[in-house]
Image (cartoon, grey):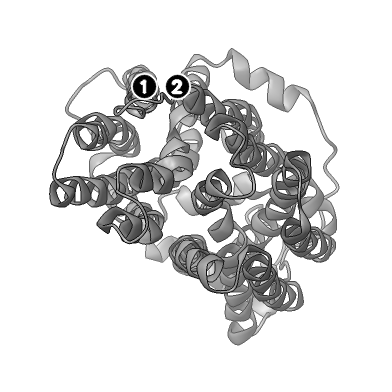
Amino acid sequence: MIPLLNFAHAQHRNHSELESQASSHLSLSGKQKHPALDIPIWRRWLVVLGAFLALFCTFGQLTSFGTYLSWYKQNQLSSYSSSTISWIGSLQLWMFFFSGAAVGWYFDHHGPRPLLVTGAVIYTSSIIMISFCKSYYQYLLAQGVLFGLGVGLMFYPPISSVATHFSEYRATALGIAAAGSSAGGIVFPIMLRRLFLHVGFPYAVRISGFLSLLCCGISALTITSARPPSSTRFKLEDYTSSLKNIKYLLLLSGSALISLGLYVPFFYIPQFVQARGYGAGSPEDHVSTYILAIMNFGGLLGRIVPAALSDHVGRFNMIFLCALFSGVSCMALWLPTSFVSTPGGRIALEITFALSFGFFSGGFIALINVCIAEISETEKVGSRIGLLYCLVSFPSMAGGPLAGRLLGSHSHAYVGMILFTGATTITGSLFILWTRLRVDSRLFVRV
């Protein structure tokens, strides 16, 4: 299951331990030969390439929903409120997160190929369907339900597969594969926005669909698992027993609160920038084309730098700071843009906010699995991460529409949304701090 593999990635292992493991040709149990050692190194890096492409086209487009929301509000779904339109993206998130545990279990027992083939068909079909949609419910089903399910099927197996192929270079391999999601989050918002304007919405979506088909096809052909299928049976108590652990429950509560606001800027920032401008051709209109890509670029840095620093300052210390400053950036950078009158000042604040929020939210996302592993026994890590993803899928789904309901019709229409995003994220960070203090009550130590 993918969470267990993330745990293996998260653990402290020095170079000599890895060399000893490889030279003894033992698995984690110490009873059988490590399966990846018989696979040529070029074949293993081919799996990394396939995983990069899978995450590039799937998660990259998932984090680009703000581009769609902005377009829908001005065109096909102009009669609907932003809150109503955001349910499309919220369903994407819910399907993606909620499917994680089931997809991971199936991967353990049957390998990646059936999931990848099914995911490629569902994912690319959903994109083509979007280009033919006319009604709101059609977008909800095609882009919300099917698209989100396709992303889940194409996201979890590649990451899991990469982890089975590497021991000594696992962190590097997983880092390269995960970079595909951030690369896609940079490319797709710009590409889609420009295609919408030059070839029209239907053809723009179909072009992205055929590009995704190519990426998914290569992924399905190149990705394999080096681990034999598992015969372990599903046990419900592995999940329910975790809710009795106070540290895990606090971490889950904090993650749920943070998830209420974490994806709101990714949904609404393009629309926000456009609304602050003065129509087509204004400086904000140009910035809105790139603002989501800028935020995802910040996320790319955030997935790398805080994770590296956490080895020195502590994982819980770092994830608390990332969660806290995600909320603080909303209050200190995003909120003031509603009151700045000069275009230059607004644009500078908008870009600074996009980079900072992307950076700190990316750090939180990168560290949450590691922190769960820090407070869990080895045999419980998989079930605990799977349970957390399933449960936070609900606040992740609710956050966008709730924030949209706070939009006003006056000159400071986004103030309520920004306050909601900042407040939920900061409050969630306090639960993360509470968890950290339960792990170790001493303030100035690495935790």
Q: Earlier in the sequence, mark 1 or mark 2?
A: 2
Task: Kindly identify the amino acid type of the residue bearing the numbered disc 2.
Answer: Leu
**Residue 406 - label:** 2
> Which is nearer the eye, 90 or 375?
90
Q: How crowded is mark 1: few (under 14 residues within 10 Å), some or many (20 or more)?
A: some
Percent across and percent down for residue 381 are 59, 37
Residues at circles 1 and 2 in contact by the CB criterion of under 8 Å: yes
- Residue drawn 37% across the image and 57% down it: 280
- Work out how far the residue at label 1 is from the one at label 2, CA to CA, in angstroms: 5 Å
Q: Name the residue under label 1.
A: 416
Q: Is residue 37 above or below residue 340?
A: below
Q: Residues within 10 Å of mark 2 (few under 14, many from 20)?
A: some
Q: Is residue 343 above or below residue 163?
A: above
- Residue drawn 49% across the image and 19% down it: 253
Task: Kindly identify the amino acid type of the residue bearing the numbered disc 1.
Answer: Gly
Q: In this view, does 370 lie above or below 210?
A: above
> Which is nearer the eye, 102 or 58?
58
